[in-house]
Amino acid sequence: MKALAWHGKGDIRCEEVPDPAIEHPRDAIIKVTACAICGSDLHIYGGIIPEMRSGDVIGHETMGEVVEVGPGNQKLKVGDRVVVPFTISCGECFFCRNGFFSACEQSNPDREKAAKLWGNAPGGLFGYSHLLGGYAGGQAEYLRVPYADVGPIKVPNHLSDEQVLFLSDIFPTGYMGAEFCDLKGGETVAVWGCGPVGQFAIRSAFLLGAERVIAIDTVPERLQLARDAGAETIDFLEEDVYDVIMDKTKGRGADACIDAVGTEAEPSSSLMARWDRIKVAAFMGTDRPHVLRQAIHCCRNFGTVSVIGVYGGFLDKIPFGSAINRGLTFRMAQTPVQRYLLKLLQLIDDGKIDPTVVITHVAPLEAGPKLYETFRDKADGCIKVVLKPGMTETLPDTAKERAHA
Ligand SMILES: NC(=O)c1ccc[n+]([C@@H]2O[C@H](COP(=O)([O-])OP(=O)(O)OC[C@H]3O[C@@H](n4cnc5c(N)ncnc54)[C@H](O)[C@@H]3O)[C@@H](O)[C@H]2O)c1
Ligand SMILES: [Zn+2]
Ligand SMILES: [Zn+2]
């Protein structure tokens, strides 16, 4: 089959790889009808995710049709149309039983290695290195889904692929980011990053009762999409984010701050942020936590900092003194996607949210390598790329029509 494989920093190729096969009775094989490129894939593309091997098949936002089911899988049958969460979860361990699916104790065969770095290990993820299971990813024609009687959700045929695909990751992730803020109604929420994840965080914050959302980025079309959802926006290269947020909140700070940027934050005028870049480039540091620092400083006393942007290692110069002295709450996670699926599918079906608004590019799988570059560079107005194996032509502007057809 064809798949997107990683061969090093900035080197992703669409190439022939062996077809996946059932390896365990609970597995299923999915014929992929649509998959997407995530901001988390950009960390792999940028060469900052450790334990990647040349030839690893990547991708973790995938949906399709079940074409083969293992003999121990009672939930799925051939022909089912499913969305596959990016987190791989057994459904039986302590964490799965408590709804913390992304911390599954059975799905990550690289547990020991991960625990050396992080003290303990999270669960396995599709297409995300040999720290997180080394599973082949879903930017491919076919995907083997382990524990396929736990993760995949069947989706109704009246909803298009574009409407439901983001249940695999970015919609639950943005929603979780807003849910972490514990909104009661009437709050001001600041969201750093107006990429696809930030867009879902903004919309979810409003759905959960925020009165105002202040969204921060510098890319004009992403800021515009945030305004379309009702947010006020700050361009971090044009204005001082801290000053503007303090101004807008009468000096108190935002009730909750969501970091939807993570480790590859661009520096603003801050010297510390530029220093992050130098340190990471010189292998003296692991992450660029500029946004996290800013989110802490901009959060009101006893407010919540919700971290959904991904970090990898040991973050430098985090103002923890500010956090303890002012009573901040920190929430963060790789999303336990399965926990949110039914609720969010219902929101889509009820028309409460239109996930297709983030899609700017729909293209065949073969266009993947080029579109990784386009997405990374935020070129050509790119906000979210959907790849469709088997599609024969590139239809950049028709995502919405296709979704509503
Ligand atoms: N927690 C999870 O389970 C989970 C799931 C999916 C994605 N993620 C993470 O969420 C993050 C965002 O993903 P995405 O797909 O939206 O990626 P993206 O790269 O498209 O979006 C990031 C956005 O942040 C903006 N940005 C950069 N520096 C900034 C700064 N200093 N201030 C404000 N904005 C800044 C960029 O312009 C960009 O629009 C990534 O770190 C990704 O790994 C986490
Ligand atoms: Zn993702
Ligand atoms: Zn488990």
Image (cartoon, helix red, strand yellow):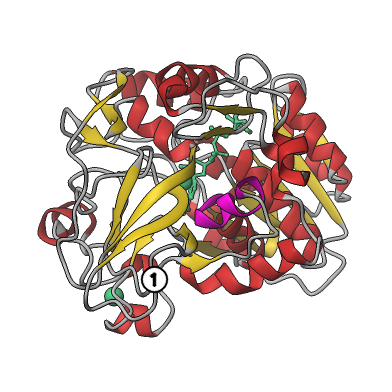
Choose between 197 and 297: the one closer to the eye.
197
Percent position of residue 287, x then y: 37, 35
Horizontal side of 111 relative to 324 (left or right) equals left
- Which residue is drawn at the image coordinates 79% and 63% (left, top)? 207
Q: Is residue 124 visible?
A: yes
Identify whether 392 is placed above or below 343. above
Q: Is residue 114 above or below residue 376?
A: below
Disc 1 residue lies near ligand 3 with CB under 8 A: no
Ligand 3 sits in which quadrant? Answer: bottom left
92 displayed left or right of 229: left
The residue where tag 1 is placed is 77
- Crowding at mark 1 (Cα within 10 Å: few <14, some 14-19, many 20+): some
Q: Position of residue 237 (x, y in %)?
A: 69, 20
Magenta segment boundaries in residue numbering: 161-170
Q: Is residue 333 left or right of residue 215?
A: left
Q: Secondary structure at mark 1?
A: loop
Residue in the foreground of this view, choosing between 339 and 82: 82
